[in-house]
Image (cartoon, helix red, strand yellow):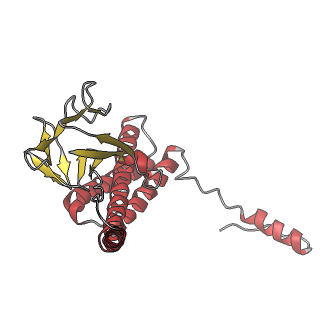
Amino acid sequence: MAFQLNIRHNIEAAEDHFASGEVRTFTGTPVRVGRAGNCECCIEAPEFEPHHFSIDAEPPSGELVLHPAAGARVFVNGHEALTDTALQSGDEIRVEHWSLRVQKVYASAGCARHSDVLSVTARVLVAVILLLEIGAVVWLPRQLQSVTRWEEEIAKQRVFIILDALRGQNIRAQRGLAPEELEAGAREAIGEELSSLVRYIRANEERLGREDWRDLYEDVLRYQRILKRLREGQAFRPVPELDIEAGVRHLLARSGEPEPAYESRRP
């Protein structure tokens, strides 16, 4: 059974607006996937074990089956594959931030030697119509659903990355030199807000949608700007003392009126 694997690193591919990824074709099985050099599908990334999983064709049907290695975490269509798992065209295999989409490759069937022209034309027209119907009914909704899922996953990963970075920066700043009292209080409050945000995400991660992740992304960007101002010392600037006499003289000078002969009295 020949098949293809469309291999993508989701974080890097996000910047290319859902790039198609690297396609590898395999004409025989088993196909071992991992970072070891003797794997038929070698992916040199720390997320993979030397032999992470293998794909084999089960006789006599030739259906593809995924065999996870002991201790290796593999997800098929969002569900963890703890045992051997059957694979169909379009199934998505996930290893942390990597995705490998399975696509079976079928040999094209030739026309019968004695088929007449009308028979061949009719079969071609039927095949074209069926393909158009499949594309309209199946392919387009799946693509739209896939794009939506990828957008949600990318927004989710962006929130995690910025949130982890902000918490790390805030903790390192609190452990450094003693800041002013206002800045220390602000950092402590922001640290509590970030921890509360993490608890909220952990409790509601499965129920959050794409719009929710976008809102969370905007929230962590606001915290990022606040911490940047604290780090640059621009959050709490002292207010200059108000000079009332200088203000009055300036206004009189602009209006052309003479200055009063008496001394101003300050309360």
59 relative position to 239: left or right: left
Q: Identify which residue is drawn at 40% across, 42% down.
A: 169
User: Is residue 99 in view from this perspective?
Assistant: no
x then y, percent, for residue 57: 14, 43
Q: Quadrant of the C terminus?
A: bottom right
Q: Nearer the viewer, residue 159 or 254?
A: 159
In this view, the residue farthest toward the front is 114
Using residue 151 as the reference point, say whether residue 206 is left or right of it: left
Q: Residue furthest top?
A: 37
Q: Residue at x 28, y 61 (%)?
A: 114
Nearest the viewer among 64 and 153 is: 64
Q: Nearer the viewer, residue 80 or 126?
A: 126
User: On the rendered structure, is 47 left or right of 72?
Assistant: right
Q: Quadrant of residue 241?
A: bottom right
In the rendered image, which quarter contains the N terminus?
top left
Q: Is residue 229 visible?
A: yes
Residue 119 is situated, as x and y percent measured from the top left of the image, at 31, 70
Residue 27 picture quarter = top left
